[in-house]
Amino acid sequence: MSTPVEFHREAIALALAESGRLCAGTPGGDCAWYHGSWPVLKGLGVFVSLKSDDDFLLPQLRAAIAAGARRVLVSGTADAGMLARLAACLPEAPDLDITVLDCCATPLALCRQYAALSGFGIRTVQADILDFRDADGFDLVCTHSFLTFFDADARRVLVRRWFELLRPGGTVLTAQRVRPGETEALTRYPAEEVAALQDAAERLCRERGEALGVDAACARHSAWQYAFHHQTHLIADAAQLREPFDRAGFRLEHFAPPPADAPVADVPGAPGNRQAARWRIVARKPA
């Protein structure tokens, strides 16, 4: 399997130019602060995102494809990161049928851009995953750090929807952070961490910004936008993370935090917590 390649400069240019317009039509509110800032921060290396889970994601994708998975749903995405992992599998499975779904048009545009630059086709669907139906079903549903965008009740609905969308024997592949020791229902950045993120973005911009078309002002503003507006729903422990999958009827084939010697250190995309870890999940629908 080849190494995932991401087109950071092109994604940043599109996000900065178009997120204000594209995000404005998203049901439930404007998310331009997120989709405009995330490609900048990811490109600079403020966050490593999926790279810290590639030692898990790529072998699991390869195994699912080797077992016959061909219809794939990317269920929610901030950018083309998960699509890039699937693209790394295309040499082994050029017949992959990939659908990318999100409620916002901006990440879908980023995924279409990625597919066009890479020379393969995808289907994009702008919809709420909780309402989405597909009569043919999918062999694989994959996403990353998505469950905390939903509260506990909505997570149960989400995971049940994944179960219903999968064909018998199909699999959910994901990774999701749990945050032990926290009690606040919503995770937010405190003011001092907002400032620290801005400083980190500016520092990395000195090294990488020119190649990406990002100056220091853009780096700082992107970090402020992301950290000031960011909030996600707390998942405090592994039991809370597991419960929706058990309730929906999944069989968990892998459910564990990353190993201590994981090749890429995780950099949290939410306020720091030394106990926090992103658990890795392979959940199978019974055949």
Image (cartoon, rainbow, N blue to C red):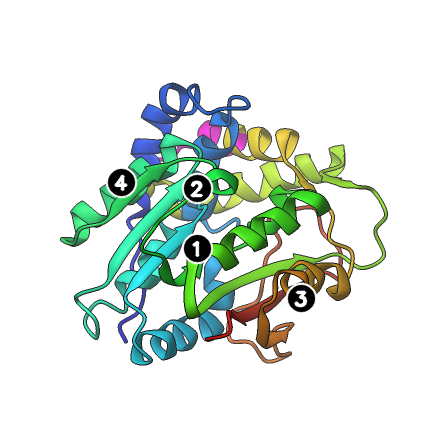
Q: Is residue 139 visible?
A: yes
Crowding near the residue tagged with mark 1, few <14, some 14–19, many ≥20 C-alpha atoms within 10 Å: many
Q: Nearer the viewer, mark 2 or mark 4?
A: 2
Please state which of residues 135 and 57 is positioned toward the viewer in this rendering.
135
Q: Is residue 121 left or right of residue 54?
A: left
**Comes first in the chain, label 2 or label 3:** 2
> What is the spatial separation of the Cα atoms under label 2 and label 1, in whole angstroms?
9 Å
Name the residue located 73 percent from the left edge and 53 percent from the top edge: 235
Q: CA distance from mark 1 to mark 3?
A: 16 Å
How many numbered circles does the render carry?
4
Mark 4 lies on residue:
10
**In the rendered structure, which disc, 4 or 3, sits on the residue that comes first in sequence?**
4
Q: Is residue 215 magenta?
A: yes
Q: Nearer the viewer, mark 1 or mark 4?
A: 1
Marks 2,1: beta carbons within 8 A: yes
Give the alpha-carbon distance from disc 2 to disc 3, as whole Å: 21 Å
Q: Is residue 185 magenta?
A: no
Q: Which amino acid does the dot numbered 2 rest on?
A: Phe
Q: Is residue 256 left or right of residue 284?
A: right
Give whichever of discs 2 and 1 has the lower sequence position. Answer: 2
